Amino acid sequence: MPNTGYILTAILLAAGITFALRLIPFGIKSALKGNALVENLSHWVPMGAIICLGFYVIASIDYSSVQTATPYLAGVVVTAGLHLWRKNLALSLVAGTAVCVVLSSWVF
C-alpha cells in the first residue's frame, strides 16, 4: 500500500502539470501578440476547419440511397445559399441543420 507522502506527491505533481497546461497558452499568446503569421492564421483557420468538416460530411453521404442523400444535400444547399445571400454564418448553419434534421426525421 502506498504511503501518504507518495500519494500527496502524485496529487501535487498532477495539479502542477494541469495548472501549467492551463497557463502556457496565455504566455504563448502574449509572446506572439502582433505576429503577422499568427494574425493571418487567426482569420483563416476557423473557416478552414468549417470547410474540412463540410468535406467530411459530403464525403460520408451514402449517395446510393435517395432517402439518405436528399436530407444532407438539401441541408448543404440551404446552408450555402443562405450564406451567399445573407452572409450570416450562424443563420446559414442553423437553417441548414434544421432542414437536414426535419427532412431526415419526418420526411424520409
Image (cartoon, helix red, strand yellow):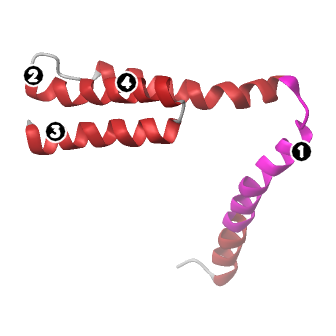
**Residue 20 circle label:** none
* Residue ID for mark 1: 30
Check disc 3 and give the amino acid type.
Ser
Relative image position of residue 32 (x, y in whole percent) = 88, 36
Label 1 Cα crowd, 10 Å radius (few <14 / some 14-19 / many 20+): few
Q: Give left or right: position of 48 versus 69.
A: right
Label 1: which secondary element: helix
Residue 46 falls in image quadrant: top right
CA gap between label 1 and label 3 equals 46 Å
CA gap between label 4 and label 3 equals 18 Å
Range drawn in magenta: 14-36
Q: Give left or right: position of 40 versus 48.
A: right
Label 2 Cα crowd, 10 Å radius (few <14 / some 14-19 / many 20+): few
Q: Decide whether the magenta segment is chiefly helix, strand or loop.
A: helix
**Residue 104 circle label:** 3
Label 4 Cα crowd, 10 Å radius (few <14 / some 14-19 / many 20+): few
Relative image position of residue 104 (x, y in whole percent) = 16, 38
Pointer 2 or 1: first along the chain: 1
CA gap between label 4 and label 2 equals 19 Å
Front-most of 65 and 94?
94
Check disc 2 and give the amino acid type.
Val
Is the C-beta separation of discs 4 and 2 under 8 Å? Answer: no
Residue 15 falls in image quadrant: bottom right
**Residue 66 circle label:** 2
Relative image position of residue 79 (x, y in whole percent) = 39, 30
Is residue 19 one of those drawn in magenta? yes
Relative image position of residue 88 (x, y in whole percent) = 53, 36
Is the C-beta separation of discs 4 and 3 under 8 Å? Answer: no
* Residue ID for mark 4: 56
